Image (cartoon, rainbow, N blue to C red):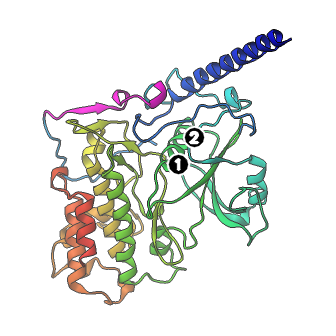
């Protein structure tokens, strides 16, 4: 009997190992169609079987980009050349929609696999309950990824609770039409599940099944900076609050850029800067983030993606991505902060449609800076500090990326105002 039991145990063990190998192979196939360069020292997937849980854009060219400075003879790294993941996974390469490597979510709909380490999977039915079946009244907004709803879940069990109890969360629901959106869903969870910083939005959990992909974040009660700057129903942000927001966003980027393997956000804009009750800043939207160059590499080469108006001119021209591309985007946000104007607005007078083209001559001019300052401030700001912010912004949006400051330098300059 003992021998029979031992043989049976060996047989079961072999079957379990084979099943794990099969699922790991399936996962590797899926991983090869995602879009983050590997970082063995920081980011990784869990491919372990979990039997206790159910399975869960390209740019148009900017008509005004200024002079483009492209260093000659620099070294670079394609995303396909990134280092391998731990446990032997191949690098996650950027794949266009025409690639032969397609990810079909139906392939994984019945697989009991944990994809992401350090983040909890949430049953889709619980998410439906938490948002009252995605009730329109709970819609917070909508971006390229899809709509975002408010919901309520239990802080520890991550199950739906009555509105006003538990914790409020923001539920981002992927539009199911786009392949790129599926890549961004994976990338965003990958990064946010591994990163912790007071100025980065906190990832609560995710959901995945055949038809739905969900990301759940902490709820930011004051919404986005975009709402406060550009929507007139909100009270005017005082000067001190604008500087506080700028410092928080700068700290987030400095943290990302100073990791052992830098992370480039690639899509800095006002709608991705979220605010809590005390106007503390939380940077969000990591769907387009990429690992930056390391060692003697000067840049990574990517397909140009992001938001019109915020992209660095050299990135638009070449697809070469560096941390200085984020610095440029942050400079644009600074100009929006002090002017109260969107980066592009065709409803403004002729010659002022493109904020950076119109505002640049005034940023470093102490006598003319007032022409671009937000009129709603009614002059209630320290003029010397405003001039310093204008100079910082001007440096950040330099057409020569080598002349842009590092984000750590930007943080120091803003904190000294």
Note whether residue 359 is visible. no
Q: In which quadrant of the rendered view does residue 388 lie?
A: bottom left
Indicate the secondary structure of the residue bearing disc 2: loop
> Which residue is situated farthest in the front direction here?
2
Q: Which residue is mark 2?
A: 116
* Residue 82 part of the magenta-drawn span: yes
Q: Residues within 10 Å of mark 1 (few under 14, many from 20)?
A: many
Q: Are marks 2 and 1 in contact (CB under 8 Å)?
A: yes
Residue for point 19% across, 47% down: 68
Quadrant in which the N terminus is drawn:
top right
User: Is 163 displayed left or right of 143 in the figure?
Assistant: right
The residue wearing badge 1 is: 193
Q: Of 51 and 271, which appears nearest the observer?
A: 51
Residues shaded magenta: 73-89
Expressed as whole percent of the image width and height from the top left, the position of residue 315 reads 29, 44
Q: Is residue 83 left or right of residue 225?
A: left
Q: Is residue 299 visible?
A: yes
User: For the residue carrying disc 2, how many other residues have a C-alpha within 10 Å: few (<14), some (14-19), or many (20+)?
Assistant: many
């Amino acid at each position: 009997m003992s021998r029979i039991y031992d043989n049976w145990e060996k047989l079961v063990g072999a079957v379990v190992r084979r099943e794990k190998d099969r699922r790991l192979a399936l996962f590797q196939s899926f991983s090869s169609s995602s879009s983050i360069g590997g970082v063995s020292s920081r980011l990784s997937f869990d491919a372990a079987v979990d039997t206790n849980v159910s399975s869960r854009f390209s740019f148009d060219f900017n008509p005004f980009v200024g002079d483009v400075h492209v260093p000659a003879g620099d070294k670079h790294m394609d995303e396909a050349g990134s280092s391998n993941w731990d446990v032997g996974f191949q690098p996650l390469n950027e794949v266009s929609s025409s690639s032969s490597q397609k990810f079909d979510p139906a392939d994984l709909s019945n697989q009991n696999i944990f994809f992401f380490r350090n983040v909890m999977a949430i049953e889709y039915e619980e998410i439906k309950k938490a948002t009252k079946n995605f009730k329109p009244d709970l819609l917070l907004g909508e971006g390229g990824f899809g709509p975002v709803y408010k919901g309520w879940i239990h802080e520890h069990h991550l199950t739906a609770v009555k509105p006003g109890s538990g914790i409020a969360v923001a539920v981002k629901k992927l539009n199911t039409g786009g392949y790129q959106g599926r890549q961004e869903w994976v990338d965003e969870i990958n990064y946010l599940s591994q990163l912790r910083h007071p100025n980065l939005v906190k990832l609560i959990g995710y959901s995945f099944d055949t038809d739905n992909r969900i990301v759940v974040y902490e709820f930011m009660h004051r919404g986005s900076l975009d709402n406060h700057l550009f929507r007139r129903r909100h009270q005017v942000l005082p000067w001190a609050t604008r500087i506080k927001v700028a410092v928080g966003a700068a700290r987030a980027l400095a943290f990302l850029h100073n990791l052992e393997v830098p992370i480039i956000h690639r899509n800095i804009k006002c709608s991705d800067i979220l605010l809590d009750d005390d106007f503390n800043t939380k940077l969000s939207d990591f769907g387009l983030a990429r690992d930056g160059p390391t060692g003697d590499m000067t840049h990574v080469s990517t397909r140009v993606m992001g938001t019109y108006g915020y992209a660095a001119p050299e990135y638009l021209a070449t697809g070469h991505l560096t941390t200085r591309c984020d610095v440029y985007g942050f400079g644009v946000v600074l100009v929006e902060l002090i002017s109260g104007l969107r980066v592009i607005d065709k409803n403004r007078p002729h010659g002022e449609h493109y904020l950076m083209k119109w505002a640049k001559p005034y940023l470093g001019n102490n006598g003319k800076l007032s022409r671009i300052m937000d009129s709603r401030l009614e002059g209630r700001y320290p003029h010397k500090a405003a001039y310093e912010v204008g100079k910082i912004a001007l440096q950040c949006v330099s057409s020569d990326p080598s002349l842009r400051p590092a984000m750590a330098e930007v943080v120091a300059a803003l904190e000294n105002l």
